[in-house]
Image (tube, coloured by chain):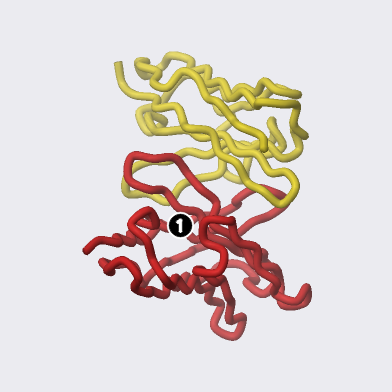
Amino acid sequence: EIVLTQSPGTLSLSAGERATLSCRASQGVNSNYLAWYQFKPGQAPRLLIYGASSRATGIPDRFSGSGSGTDFTLTINRLEPEDFAVYYCQHYSDSVFTFGPGTNVDIK
Amino acid sequence: EVQLVESGGGLVKPGGSLRLSCAASGFIFSNAWMGWVRQAPGKGLEWVGRIRRETEGATPDHIAPVKGRFTISRDDSRDTLYLQMNSLKTEDTAIYYCINENWGRFENWGLGTLVTVSS
């Protein structure tokens, strides 16, 4: 079973800064099935990135995804106040969905 | 606009049962693979299971910890997804999210409904 690890656990930044979030898989994965989600209190979770680098509908272009194999990155350029949230990566393989433990991006 | 609205959560004793519902709108429900994801308090996300389209037999998949206790079903005439939970355990305590699945990703999520299993 593939295990996803995310780092850092918490990222403390100011609005306007760049956030770089890492997701590492325990073995090489198909990047077509690597996604990122945003969780904010009181709101429905939101798909941000799928296929490792494709933005979901309505997602601002300050969000970008990259990576392949075992290492994937979510980058948020010029953090907006509404971007402070918890971010999860997720992978799908062999009819199994796996999530990483999440990265909390909070206000410095 | 896609909307997924869960209902049916609450407090139940260990060994009890609960049925969650998810009312869908804004997309063609009968064409969608649907499912549930849960998050226990202070813990990570866990996929619970999914159900295929009626045209594919509406066959469900469930993760091992809930197999034999939970059943996912759908009513396309009502655009509604269900999660029947029996023999509930304290470790089933979580927020349960309704999702629609597309190519290995969860396109849309509901707000979630809290299930608390406690005596």
Tag 1 residue = B97
Chain letter, yellow in picture: A
Tell me what residue is drawn at x 43 percent, y 72 percent: B86
Q: Residue at x 37, y 19 (%)?
A: A15
Of residues A74 and B51, the one nearer the viewer is B51
Q: What amino acid does circle 1 point to?
A: Tyr
Up the image or down, A63 lies above or below B94; here it is above
Q: Residue reaching furthest bottom?
A: B77
Place of residue B32 in the rendered image (x, y in percent of width and height, measured from the top left): 67, 66
Which residue is more in the foreground, A2 or A18? A2
Horizontal and vertical percent for residue A13? 37, 15
Number of labels in the image equals 1
* Residue B23 at least partly seen: no
- Is A47 on the left or on the right of A25, as rendered? left
Residue B8 lies in what quarter of the image? bottom left
Can residue B87 be seen at all in this image of the molecule?
Answer: yes
Circle 1 crowding by C-alpha within 10 Å: few under 14, some 14–19, many from 20: many
Residue occupying image coordinates x 55% and y 39%: A99
Where is residue A43 drawn, in percent x and y?
37, 49
* Left-right relation of B42 to A26: left
Residue A63 figure quarter: top right
Quick one: B61 or B15, which is closer to the camera?
B15
Q: Secondary structure at mark 1?
A: strand
Q: Position of residue A84 (x, y in %)?
A: 37, 29
Does B119 sit above or below residue A16? below
| Display colour for chain B | red
The answer to whether B119 is drawn above or below residue B16 in the figure is above
> Which residue is found at the position 49% from the left and 70% from the top?
B83
